[in-house]
Structure formats: structure tokens, C-alpha cells
Image (spheres, rainbow, N blue to C red):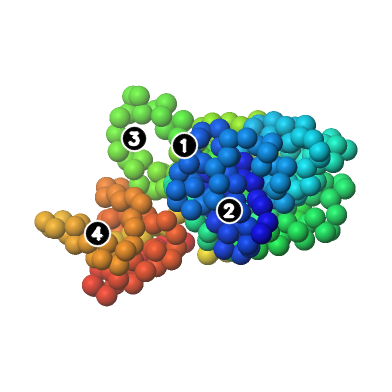
Amino acid sequence: MRNVLLIGVGLIGGSIALSIKNEHDATIYGYDVYTESSETAKRLGVIDVAVHDVEDAAAIADLIIIATPVEETLKVMKRLTSITPVIKALVMDVGSTKNSIMTKAEELANKGLRFIGGHPMAGSHKTGVESAKAHLLENAFYFLTPNSITSDVDIDEAKIWLKGTRAKFLVSEPDEHDFLTGIVSHFPHLIASSLVRIAQNHAVDKPLIQQLAAGGFRDITRIASSSPKMWSDIVSQNKSHLLNLLHEWKEEMDEVIRFVENGDQAELYNYFDGAKSFRDSLPVRSKGAIHPFSDLYVDILDRIGALSHITALLAESNISIINLSILEVREGLNGVLRLSFQNDNDRDQAQEILKNEDYLTHITL
């Protein structure tokens, strides 16, 4: 029996803990600054022991997973090096940015801390340990970022511990990780928020904007609804890469302004066609940097009981709907009703059930 200490008992940490429990004979100790989170995790079987003292649990741990925001992770790392005798555990984190964490890891390596950075690129529409699932990270990309003295043995050990996640491991330099995630995750969140702010500014004088934005605009900016605290921390931690990308974005927009001003149909066509070609070449079912939305669009008639019939059909098959909305603006969308599910498997099962009942359904790619 081996011991694992989970520091930060939430969705990601809890899901990793469950995957370890499924794959290894291990006791999971859980610590969280919010005691109710660790107590809930114990009640749900996510962890085995809720602890109130990191030092005692760290002293007997074979693996320590820090599943907290980056700023808090840096504090926890420093705290771990103050433990005597030096802890023997392999330490991993799950932070969305890696440069600052791995810089700290370099400093603490001299004090005996054996550390490897990690970033599982998956999430959920729900938060909290109550939503943790052992398969949450299945087929998702999982970055491992070693430091200059991390051995191949440590990397292999990390992969063995995380085998139960069924994730796809990528070993990367910390700066490369931050650049890649900056482009495909952090930067899009900034842009989505800026689009929403522009609409917000005009909505003061044009209140119809809020109603009209309920269609495609709401879809393409949905990531702007993510946690403001989390994203302000991420942007601060990945500042240098994001500043470069923002300047590049300004140059790109200057080109677009020129295209529009010139009114050159060929230039505009080539611009849109180039974007379409690259976008269409992206993997359809792969779990990328931004968690995909498992949505199903359904055509229904405005009749009494139509909505309840659909929800009853799915409830009978134990398929949970995490969100439901009637679409008034449907440009580019085939369907009146949008059903959102926890994952693609639930969505695909729902589509099959509704098709058998002669409902017209559609999935956007």
C-alpha cells in the first residue's frame, strides 16, 4: 500500500485521485484550505483520509499532487521544503502555466524537492470535487514539464502514477508549454472577453443586442464565462507570451482593417478561405486546450409537453442534461432547442434516443 497526498481537493485533483485509486493500491490523503471540500471528498470516496496537517501527511507520502491555483502552488512548494527530514515523495502540480512554477522548482531542487510540472488539459462545465470523475482526463493531453535535473526515472514514475487517467502525455519545456497554451487557450479567452465587452458597451444604447447575442455570438464567446479569478491569475503568470500575441493580434487587425477599407473581394475571400481551411483541418473529436462543449441541437414544435417529453426520454436512460436553452437567434444553427451534456458520450446517446423517436437533431463541429 502506497500513500498519496492531494493538496487542493477540487474537480481536477479529485479526478486524478479517483484515477489513481482505480489503477493503484494506494491510500489517498486529502488536504484543502476549505475543510468542507476534503470532508465531502472523503464522503464521496474520492479520498480515503481528510487531513488538516500537510506536514504529517507529506512525510509519509510517496506522491504529492498540488492541485491549487498557481500562486498558491508556489506557496505550497516552499512550504514542502521546510519539512524535515526532507520528503521523499515525487511532487507534481496541475497548474495552467509552468514557467514560474518550474523556476521555483529549480530553486527548491537544491533543497531536495523532487518535482515535475504537470498540466492536464481538460475540465468540465461543473466545478468542485462533487463533479470529479476518474475518466475526466481520458484522451486529453497531459503536459509534463521536467526541470533541468529531472531524471527519466522521475518522468516514467509520473506517467505510471497517472496511467489511470488514460491521458495522452506530452513532455515539454515549461516555456514551450506556456507559449502553446497561450496561443490556443489563454489568448482566446482574452479575445472572447474583449468581444463581450464591445457588445456590452453598445448594449447600453442598443438593448436589442442582448437578445440578438443569444445565438452564435453567445456560442463563440462562451469561454468568457470562465472564472475571472482563475483567468486573471493565468494572464498574470503568462504575461510575456500574451503580450507578444496581443501585439501580433493588433497587426492582424490592421490587415483586416485594410482589407475592409479597400473593399477588395479577392483579399477578403482569401482571408476567410484561409481561416476556414485551417479551422476545418483541426481534429473534430480531440480534447484540446479549451474544453469542448457537448451540445446537441434538436428541432421541436411549439406544442404543450414537447419539452417535457424530451427530458423524460433522456431521464429514463439516466442521461443528465447540464444545461438547456430555447434558441431565438439561430443563424447557422439547425435546431430550436440546445441541450448541453457533461461529455460527448452522453450527447451521442441522447442523439440516438431522440433519433429513434423521429426528432431531427444536429451536432456542430
For marks 3 and 4, give the one nearer the viewer: 4
Tag 1, which secondary structure?
helix
Residue at position x 49%, y 46% from top? 41
Q: Quadrant of residue 234?
A: top right
Distance from disc 1 to disc 4, alpha carbons, whole Å, reads 33 Å
Amino acid residing under circle 2: Ala
Q: CA distance from mark 4 to mark 2?
A: 32 Å
Residue wearing tag 4: 311
Give the residue number, with chain letter if any, for mark 3.
209
- The amino acid type, in three-letter code, at marker 4 is Thr
Residue found at the far left of this picture: 304
Q: Residue 190's spot in the image, x, y percent? A: 56, 36
Q: Earlier in the sequence, mark 3 or mark 2?
A: 2
| Residue 179, above or below 122 | above
Question: Label 3 sits on what residue type?
Answer: Ile
User: Callout 3: helix, strand or loop?
Assistant: helix
- Classify mark 4: helix, strand or loop: helix
Q: Position of residue 15 (x, y in %)?
A: 54, 53
x 26%, y 66%: residue:
316
Name the residue beneath numbered marker 2. Answer: 17
Q: Which residue is mark 1?
A: 36
Where 88 sits versus 33, above or below? below
Name the front one of labels 1 and 4: 1
Are the residues tagged 1 and 2 within 8 Å (C-beta)?
no
Judge by depth and name the residue closer to the eye, 250 or 23: 23
Labels 1 & 4 near each other (Cβ < 8 A): no
